[in-house]
Amino acid sequence: MNKIIFETEMFKVDVPERPFVDRQDGGHVRILSKLKVKDRTELNTEQTIEYALLSEIIGKSLELTMTQREIEIGNINWQEMGNWSVFKPEGITLHMHIFGRAKEATTQKYGEAVKLPFRDTGFYEGFSPLDNEDIESLKSNIEILLRTKKYIGLNNANR
């Protein structure tokens, strides 16, 4: 079961149980739309702003958290895809994957594009999700960032 770590009225953030980037390689979190929209072009202005700011907060929080947990993050990747959903009855729903890119990564190597083969290839077998301590640290860092001047509006709206 994926763990919800943060929510607004329009979006939720979770830690996938079956990540695309192993915890030791930097970790993986997602922003999921609660609205049934295919992509960001179907959001209104306020929703687009919230989505953009939320992605910044979550990316920065992931970087801070993993660095605090002694996994040196060199970069964060933000990716919207939906390729695997094109043939599902419900179709694509807006979501964003956020990947930490650890400098000492062994599988999803730093400086290379993230590899995302189909699940049935076995590529992701053995990838560990963020652990409970990572998640608590992530939540704490999100709350700290929400109190900064840049993000204070997101903190007060839609939660």
Image (spheres, helix red, strand yellow):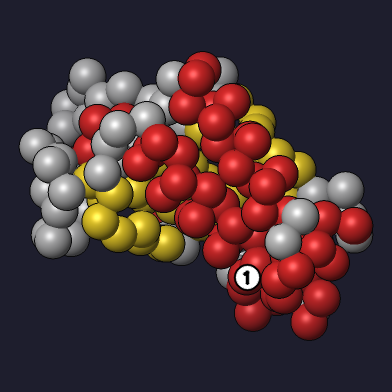
Residue found 50% across the figure and 20% down from its top? 133
**Along the viewing direction, whichever of 18 and 152 lies nearer the viewer:** 152
Query: In which quadrant is the N terminus drawn?
Result: top right
In the rendered view, would you say 136 is above or below 82?
above
Q: Quadrant of residue 14?
A: top right
- Residue 70 % position (x, y): 30, 32
Residue found 66% across the figure and 54% down from its top? 145
- Residue 94 % position (x, y): 60, 59
In the rendered view, would you say 130 is above or below 145?
above
Q: Is residue 2 left or right of residue 124?
A: right
Regarding mark 1 in the picture, which secondary structure is present there? Answer: helix
Q: Quadrant of residue 128?
A: top left
Q: Is residue 68 left or right of residue 145?
A: left
Looking at numbered disc 1 in the image, what kind of residue is underneath it? Ala
Query: Circle 1 sits on which residue?
Result: 52
Q: Is residue 151 left or right of residue 23?
A: right
- Residue 15 % position (x, y): 51, 33
Residue found 55% across the figure and 31% down from its top? 137
Q: Is residue 120 visible?
A: no
In the rendered view, would you say 116 is above or below 49?
above
**Along the viewing direction, whichever of 143 and 108 lies nearer the viewer:** 143
Q: Is residue 129 visible?
A: yes
Circle count: 1
Residue found 63% across the figure and 35% down from its top? 139
**Along the viewing direction, whichever of 105 and 67 lies nearer the viewer:** 67
Q: Is residue 116 left or right of residue 132?
A: left
Mark 1, residues whose alpha carbon is within 10 Å: few (<14), some, or many (≥20)? few
- Residue 19 % position (x, y): 36, 33
